[in-house]
Image (tube, grey):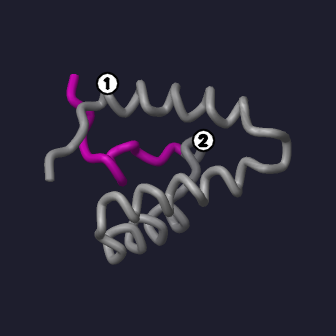
Amino acid sequence: MSRLRFEQLENLYDELAHALDAVPDGHESVFLAKLVLSMAHEFGQPERVSALIQQCLHEPAPDAGAPRELIWGEPDV
């Protein structure tokens, strides 16, 4: 499976941020859960999705100075 370039991740981040802004207040968690489950169904790799959920759960917040390589690897510059 090929990985996305950092620019592609940034574009998806922007799209996700706009989508979250469009979701009614208080329903952001439901939207994100539906998105993750839809992606898991599309990719057909439940073990990998579970591993990513755990990784994101235990990864420090971005404002804690955590390097962004933890999930996506080195950015393509």
- Residue that label 1 marks: 7
Residue 71: x and y in percent read 35, 53
Would you call the spot at circle 1 few (<14 residues within 10 Å), some (14-19), or many (20 or more)?
A: few
**Residue 38 place in picture, x, y as percent:** 47, 57
Residue type at mark 1 is: Glu
Which corner quadrant of the image does residue 44 belong to?
bottom left
> In this image, 4 relative to 60: left or right?
left
| Quarter placement of the C terminus | top left
Position in image of residue 8 (x %, y %): 32, 28
Q: Are marks 2 and 1 in contact (CB under 8 Å)?
A: no
- Residue drawn at x 72%, y 30% is 22
Region rendered in magenta: 65-77
Disc 2 target residue: 63
The residue sitting at the right extreme is 25
Locate residue 55 relative to residue 77 in the image: left or right: right
Decide which of 58, 5 is in the foreground and name it: 5
Secondary structure of the residue carrying numbered label 2: helix
Residue drawn at 85 percent across, 41 percent down: 25
Is disc 2 surrounded by few (<14), some (14 to 19) or many (20+) residues within 10 Å?
Answer: few
Kindly identify the amino acid type of the residue bearing the numbered disc 2: Asp
Give the number of the mark in front: 2 or 1.
1
Residue at left 35%, top 58%?
42
User: Most extreme residue toward the bottom, as rendered?
Assistant: 47
Residue 32 sits inside the magenta stretch: no
Q: Nearer the viewer, residue 38 or 10?
A: 38
In the figure, 67 relative to 58: above or below?
above
Per the picture, the main secondary structure of the magenta-coloured stretch is loop
